[in-house]
Structure formats: C-alpha cells, structure tokens
Amino acid sequence: MKLFLLWIMVVVILIPCMGLTQESQQPLSLEDCIQIALENNSQLKISESQLQIANKDYKSSYSNILPSVNLSSQMRKYERGPSFYIGDVFIGPSSPANVLTKGEDYGLGFSVSQNIFDGGYWWNNIRKTKSDKKSQEYAHLSQKQLTIVMVHEGYFTLLKAVKLLEVDDQAVRRSQEQLERTEAQFQLGAVAKVDVFQARTNLGNDRIEYLTQKNTVEKAKQDLNLILGRDPQEPIEIETDFSMETQDTTLNAMFEQALANNPDLKRTEQDLKSAKLQTKLAVSNFIPSVGGFYSYSRTVPDFNDLYKDFLNREYYWSLGLQLRWNLFNGFSDFLNVQKSKINEKIVREQVDDTKRNIMSIIKSLVDNLESYREIIEINKENLESAREQYRLAQERYRVGSGTALEVREAQVGLTRAEQILVSAENNAMITYAQLREALGELATAY
C-alpha cells in the first residue's frame, strides 16, 4: 500500500514537470540552428574525419627521412643428409658420411637502414602531402559553408511555409466572414441563393489550400531536422520574426574577395600544387638513390649462449652504402611522368573553370538579389492596393452595388499579393546566404 501511494506521488510530481519542459521549449533562431548543424550534421562529421586522415598522411610522409630499424630472432632445427663433404673438403664416397646429421641453433640480430638521397622523392612527397592536407582543409571549409547554407535554405523554407500558412489561414477567415455576411444578406433578401453557394465553395477551396500548406510546413520541419542532424520527427519551432541585413559592394570587389577566400577555389589551387609535385615525384625515379645500412647478428647452438659474450664471438656485422639506379623497367617510369603531366594539365583547367563558375554564380546571385529587392518594394505597394481593393469590394457588395464575384477576385488578389511578398522576402534571404557562400564569408563567420 505504501509503495502504491509512493508511485502515485511520483506520477503527480512528474506530470507537471513534463508539461513544464514541453512548454519551456523555446523557438530556435537561425544562429541556434547553425550551431546545432555544425555539431551534428553527418556530412560535416565525415569531412572532419577525412581531414584527420589527411593530417595522418602528412605526418606519415616524414617516415622516408627517418631511419628504419629492425630486430629479428630465430630458432631453427635442421637435419643434414649423408654427404661426401666435411665442410668444404671432399672426402670421397668410400668414407663415412654421417657428420653433423642433426642439430639446432638460435639467432638474434638487428639492422638499421637510412635513406641518404633518393632524387628528392622524400622532400617532394612531404610537400605533396602537405598540399593534400591543405586541400582537405579547404574541402572541410567548403563543406562547413555548404552546411551553413543548407541551414539557411531549410530555415527560410520553413519560415516561408509558416508565413504562407498564416496567409492561407487569413484567407480562410476572410472566406468564413464573407460566407456569414452573405448568408445574413440572403436572409434579408438582399442577395441570391447562388451567392451563398459560391461563398461556401470559396471557403472550401481556401480550406483545401490551408490543409495543403499545413502539410508543406510539416515537410519543411522534417527537412530542417535532417539538415541539423536530428530525428526528422523531433518537434521543432523557429523564430518567425526575422529581418535581413545585407551589405552592398561593387561586383569587382566581390570577385576579388571570392578569388581570395572561396574555399572551393583554394582547394583546386592546392590540388594543382599537389599535381605539380606528383610530376616531380615521378621524375625522381630516373635519379639514383643512395642509402646507408648497418646490421649485426649472431647464431649459437644453445639458447643460453645467445646472450653470453654478446660482442665477442659468433657474431657478424656489416656496414656500408648502397646505390640503386633503375636503368630500365619497361618504360613504366617514363609513362608515369607523362600521366602526371597530363593530370597536372587537367587540374590547371579545373582551377580556371572554377574561377569562371564562381564569377558567373556571383553575378547571377547579385542580379537575383537585386530583383528580389525590387520585387519586395513593388509588392509592398501592391499589397496596400490589394487591401484597399478588397475593402472597397466588400463595401460595394454590402450596399448592393457590387457582386460576390468582385469580392472574391479582390480577396484572391489580396491573398496572392501576400504570398508573393512572403516568398520574395524569404527567397531573398536564401539568395543572400548563397552569395556569402560564394564569397567565402560563411566559413569564417561561424
């Protein structure tokens, strides 16, 4: 009984707390969404792991200038068959040949080798992996920018959907008010029955638009959650009050800024540097290489003797230099050089193509942004005119000098003006974010 009462008390306490937690959930701002995405976005995490691999490859490239040290140990049992020799002395077929037929020995040794000169391969390989690492750093910045832009697109797409839902809700309210007004006038005999039917049809159509837009809002919430790296079904609300602040500058200044900061362009430039170094690596195969080595080993018949008189007996050591020069290997080195030069040419074209594309993208985004600004100003005026037209149409219909069709046309015009303004404002925000991405600003802004 006491346990049951305790359980009831826990439930009574937890239920209000759960409700308080749900009610205290604050709408997410654009900055909040960006920070969540930078922590959770899957593609950005993959890019971070790829950057870590590039860092490891760069550190690994130093292994070519460090000595190589090996330690070896062996245990061997052997059996020698009948022989006509004792050592190197021939004793003939008539002599006993049973000397040293079985035995065992143990060995221990170590060796050190050092690369002295390899035609510049080790130095150019370090430089190449460093360029590859920088290329991956810029690729990571590019992915970071892309993530931020996707958050902008998802956020403003949801914001636009929410605003359009409010417009559709207002349209339903207007249709409901018009239906009630028409029914009242019909009761007074001021309008025909067909006007009531038309008003009901208009209300039904507006409700359909509202329900369709409601589904669009839910889909936009799921898409934004996916960008943020969260469960698509997780509840999410965003702040609906947002004003865009843009910075105006000349087109040439934008081009210069993009050429200096765009991470995609910087990445391709590092790829070109890496391709040039790859050609030098291929050429180094035509140059002789020099290395030094030292080795020490000993072999004894008894394991306990392996560590006795380590430096005095039954040992072998060698010290020397080794020169290697590949004179011919079936034109493989020659073809590798030719392939590297062709790849270098390809990457150089990619750099030029990236520059042209960036300039084209910036020009298009600037033109679109200017168009949206003009559209916004025009639609603000159109919206005021549409509101006045709707008011006048209602007034004429009330006094009997207008028709229901005129009221409906004015209502549709008002709703359309509100929709165009909402779409233009949010599309302008998305376009401005895309422009900042092309200029290379977003990666450093967050």
Image (spheres, rainbow, N blue to C red):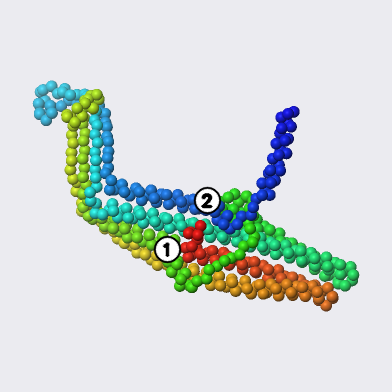
Label ID, residue 291: none
Depicted 290 relative to depicted 313: above or below: below
Rendered image quadrant of residue 172: bottom right
Depicted 119 relative to depicted 354: above or below: above
Q: Residue at x 35, y 48 (%)?
A: 59
Q: Which element is circle 1 on?
A: helix
Q: Residue at x 81, y 76 (%)?
A: 396
Q: Is residue 435 left or right of residue 208?
A: left
Q: Residues within 10 Å of mark 2 (few under 14, many from 20)?
A: few
Q: Which element is circle 2 on?
A: helix
Label ID, residue 39: 2
For the residues marked 2 and 1, what is the alpha-carbon distance in whole angstroms? 25 Å
Looking at the rendered structure, the kind of residue marked 2 is Glu
Name the residue carrying label 1.
265
Measured as percent of width and height from the top left, residue 192 is found at 86, 71
Camera-side residue of 127 and 260:
260
Nearest to N terminus: mark 2 or mark 1: 2
Q: Residue at x 40, y 65 (%)?
A: 351
Q: Residues within 10 Å of mark 1 (few under 14, many from 20)?
A: many
The number of discs equals: 2
Camera-side residue of 176 and 34:
34
Looking at the rendered structure, the kind of residue marked 1 is Leu
Measured as percent of width and height from the top left, residue 241 is found at 64, 61
Q: Is residue 312 visible?
A: yes
Q: Residue at x 63, y 58 (%)?
A: 239
Measured as percent of width and height from the top left, residue 23 is found at 68, 49
Measured as percent of width and height from the top left, residue 327 is found at 20, 53
Q: Is residue 405 visible?
A: no
